[in-house]
Image (spheres, grey):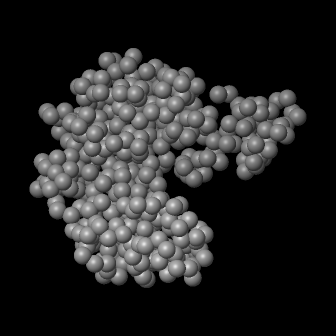
């Protein structure tokens, strides 16, 4: 992408302006390429939160909206790069190149493979700007180039999750490339195959489809689940797991590791177990509510590792199918939200509406409850908001109740 000086000047002068407004009031200077202006300003504004290091680097060029939306954030890219090690890698889902550059900082050499020529040119430019010089750029598809590339230590793949009509898909066989068809050929070319999948994927069905998996990482950022990452290996290949991500030797052979991670500005919360351990550990069910109510974060909820969570933090589940926990002790490092319980109301629609009639506003949630949160709100005639939280849920013994609490 060649950008003339006038266009660069216009981009710099309007870097923080509203893009929609700029589109309605374009520059009258014919030397200013407004299509480029709008793409670069929109991209840079998006990068401010998603890719702060790129945003802070002068001269980075940004792709069209869809490529920027689909790329990893700096946080998730760096996390994935921390999971693998070795001398060489290949990223067969190049795109904007955020994951490629995160991997390039860990490996001696690598490959960026991308079928869109425009993205290849952008990546080449950005590598120079970001001082990355150990990546070979290949303009083409994985299917066309797999035979010629490798073997490498790690292959990274982010299958396209849109069909020919642009609609989102989730199942492995609907993605491009179809991992179920290509996994053996990919694993023949590497020690570790790292695959980024949709947060909507069914983890346990996918583990049945991908028995070569040795670890699953559910990655959330600031409480929002962003990615589910599967790490696969051949039976005869060494496990390339970073020393910052150890798998305890006593549990390494009890099924794939399942790790739920929530990356926040101030800390990273992590819960880890293995598939077999989670399945064989009996749940800790509360016979009565304690002082505090614990709501797991999105990563733990997606990973479904509630028995590990209960054991690690010494908290009890409200009921087998109610994914809320309780304890008398305060766990400040709990991966999720913590509430102090103020009252428990047995659920009888008319009676409870009268008991809570003094509340005009509250945040309402339903967990394993006969009513949805919105239905419960209508029953109680309470508006949204305020510092009060109400959880409609089921306790042990199939007791339906509404727990009234405040956030700790």
Quarter of the figure with residue 198? top left
Q: Is residue 107 depicted above or below 137 in this figure?
A: below
Q: Is residue 316 depicted above or below 21 in this figure?
A: below
Who's the residue at 37% across and 33% down the image? 171
- In the picture, measured across the screen, residue 346 lies left or right of residue 12, that is left
Percent of width and height locating residue 169 = 45, 33
Furthest-right residue in view?
28
Percent of width and height locating residue 27 = 85, 37
Quarter of the figure with residue 223? bottom left
Quarter of the picture holding the N terminus: top right
Percent of width and height locating residue 263 = 42, 58
Answer yes or no: is residue 15 visible.
yes
Percent of width and height locating residue 266 = 45, 66
Frontmost residue, 358 versus 92: 358
- In the picture, measured across the screen, residue 374 lies left or right of residue 10, that is left
Who's the residue at 74% across and 44% down the image? 19
Quarter of the picture holding the C terminus: bottom left
Who's the residue at 32% across and 70% down the image? 399
């Amino acid at each position: 992408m060649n950008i003339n000086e006038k266009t660069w000047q216009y981009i710099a002068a309007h870097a923080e302006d509203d893009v929609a407004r700029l589109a309605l009031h374009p520059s009258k200077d014919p030397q200013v390429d407004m299509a480029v202006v709008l793409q670069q300003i929109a991209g840079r504004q998006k990068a401010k939160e998603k890719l702060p290091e790129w945003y802070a680097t002068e001269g980075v060029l940004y792709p069209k909206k869809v490529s920027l939306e689909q790329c990893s954030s700096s946080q998730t890219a760096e996390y994935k790069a921390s999971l693998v090690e070795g001398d060489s890698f290949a990223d067969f889902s190049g795109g904007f190149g955020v994951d490629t550059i995160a991997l390039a900082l860990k490996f001696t050499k690598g490959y960026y493979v991308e079928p869109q020529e425009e993205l290849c040119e952008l990546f080449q430019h950005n590598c120079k700007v970001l001082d990355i010089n150990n990546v070979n750029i290949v303009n083409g598809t994985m299917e066309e180039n797999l035979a010629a590339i490798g073997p490498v230590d790690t292959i990274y793949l982010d299958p396209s999750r849109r069909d020919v009509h642009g609609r989102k898909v989730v199942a492995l066989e609907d993605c491009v490339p179809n991992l179920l068809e290509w996994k053996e050929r990919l694993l023949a070319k590497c020690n570790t195959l790292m695959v980024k999948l949709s947060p909507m994927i069914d983890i346990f069905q996918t583990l049945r489809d991908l028995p070569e998996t040795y670890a699953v990482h559910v990655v959330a950022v600031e409480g929002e689940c962003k990615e589910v990452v599967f790490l696969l290996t051949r039976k005869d290949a060494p496990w390339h797991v970073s020393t910052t991500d150890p798998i305890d030797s006593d549990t390494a052979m009890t099924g794939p590791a399942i790790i739920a991670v929530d990356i926040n500005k101030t800390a990273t919360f992590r819960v880890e177990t293995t598939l077999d351990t989670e399945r064989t550990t009996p749940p800790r069910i509360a016979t009565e509510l304690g002082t505090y109510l614990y709501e797991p974060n999105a990563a733990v909820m997606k990973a479904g590792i509630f028995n590990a969570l209960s054991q690690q933090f010494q908290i009890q589940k409200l009921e087998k199918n109610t994914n809320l926990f309780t304890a008398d002790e305060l766990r400040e490092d709990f991966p999720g939200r913590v509430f102090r319980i103020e009252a428990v109301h047995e659920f009888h629609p008319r009676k409870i509406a009268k008991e809570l009639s003094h509340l005009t506003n509250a945040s309402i949630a339903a967990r394993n409850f006969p009513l949805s949160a919105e239905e419960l709100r209508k029953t109680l005639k309470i508006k949204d908001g305020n510092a009060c939280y109400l959880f409609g849920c089921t306790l042990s013994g199939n007791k339906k109740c509404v727990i009234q609490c405040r956030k700790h």
